Image (tube, grey):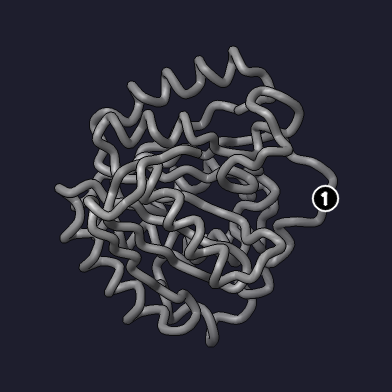
């Protein structure tokens, strides 16, 4: 996540999703921004939706109104506004900057483990998503990715997980299926729920104690957002999952 992205159309859908999963604070959420320094690229310019309330406000009017200042006051294009405006009820925000250094990264995630301990779900918001082979751990641009070892550690600590993921240059339906299957295999879990939008993918992995809540609220996402956010539940019996050899 970069401050320059804050409040764009992807953020609107992201926070709407988190708000529905939270269900007014019933599920305690920790937001791990995986915040990286701004750059000169043009990402984050998709904010015209804020000037189209007739089309977009109906999905979550309270959230829309909280994000609207990002259009009228550029100084509010900062992740701190999410906490100030209370966009996700009861959420905690892990705001440290993540850099391309393996030792600092290890410290970052070690301290994150303590930070999220009292929460039910941790949301990871990397610039790009899950690790790729071309970006080794701790090397240049590694801060844009979440690595499997980090995902597995938070999962092992009992947290449900929501992950922001860019689509890669692959057929989207197959990419989504592959991501869900990889997560099921890696985490040894039967359930993965995906939320596909026009630009990005969100992946929800519920712990067993949160399964009923997450399935119910995912149905609410489908009811509220319709085809704008495509919801799919990937379920696979644990005994049929192959052992992870990745």
Q: Residue at x 64, y 50 (%)?
A: 77
Q: Position of residue 33 (x, y in %)?
A: 52, 39
> Seen in the image, is 186 located left or right of residue 80?
left
Q: Residue at x 65, y 42 (%)?
A: 132
Q: Which residue in the rendered view is the most extreme toward the bottom?
A: 54
> Seen in the image, is 161 located left or right of residue 246?
left
Q: Position of residue 234 (x, y in %)?
A: 34, 65
Foreground pick, 51 / 231: 231
> Seen in the image, is 45 located left or right of residue 181?
right
Foreground pick, 193 / 113: 193
Q: Residue at x 76, y 28 (%)?
A: 140
Q: Is residue 58 above or below residue 111?
A: below
Q: Is residue 149 above or below residue 216?
A: above
Q: Residue at x 61, y 27 (%)?
A: 98
Foreground pick, 131 / 201: 131
Q: The residue tagged with tag 1: helix, strand or loop?
A: loop
Foreground pick, 41 / 194: 194
Q: How many marks?
A: 1
Q: Quadrant of residue 145?
A: top right
Q: Quadrant of residue 156?
A: top left
> Seen in the image, is 229 located left or right of residue 74?
left
Which quadrant, please, contains the N terminus? top right
Which residue position is annotated with label 1?
41
Q: Is residue 56 above or below residue 140?
A: below
Q: Which residue in the rendered view is the most extreme toward the right?
A: 40
Q: Decide: few, some or many residues near mark 1? Use Cα within 10 Å; few <14, some 14-19, many ≥20.
A: few
Q: Position of residue 21 (x, y in %)?
A: 30, 59
């Amino acid at each position: 996540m970069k401050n320059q992205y804050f409040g764009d159309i992807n953020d609107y859908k992201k926070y709407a999703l988190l708000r529905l999963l939270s269900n007014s604070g019933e599920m305690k959420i920790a937001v791990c921004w995986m915040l990286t320094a701004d750059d000169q690229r043009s990402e984050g310019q998709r904010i015209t939706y804020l000037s189209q309330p007739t089309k977009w406000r109906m999905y979550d009017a309270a959230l829309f109104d909280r994000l609207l200042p990002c259009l009228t006051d550029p100084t509010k294009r900062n992740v701190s506004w999410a906490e100030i405006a209370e966009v996700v009820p009861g959420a905690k925000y892990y705001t440290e900057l993540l850099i391309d250094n393996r030792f600092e990264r290890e410290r970052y995630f070690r301290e994150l483990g303590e930070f999220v301990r009292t929460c039910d779900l941790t949301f990871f918001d990397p610039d790009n998503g899950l690790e790729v082979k071309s970006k080794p751990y701790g090397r240049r641009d590694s801060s844009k990715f979440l690595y499997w070892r980090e995902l597995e550690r938070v999962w092992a600590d009992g947290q449900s997980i929501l992950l922001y993921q860019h689509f890669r240059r692959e057929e989207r339906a197959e990419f989504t299926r592959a991501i869900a299957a990889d997560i099921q295999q890696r985490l040894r879990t039967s359930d993965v729920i995906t939320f596909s939008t026009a630009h990005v993918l969100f992946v929800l992995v519920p712990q067993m104690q949160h399964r009923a809540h997450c399935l119910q609220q995912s149905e609410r996402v489908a009811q509220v957002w319709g085809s704008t956010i495509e919801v799919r539940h990937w379920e696979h019996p644990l005994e049929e999952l192959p052992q992870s050899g990745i």
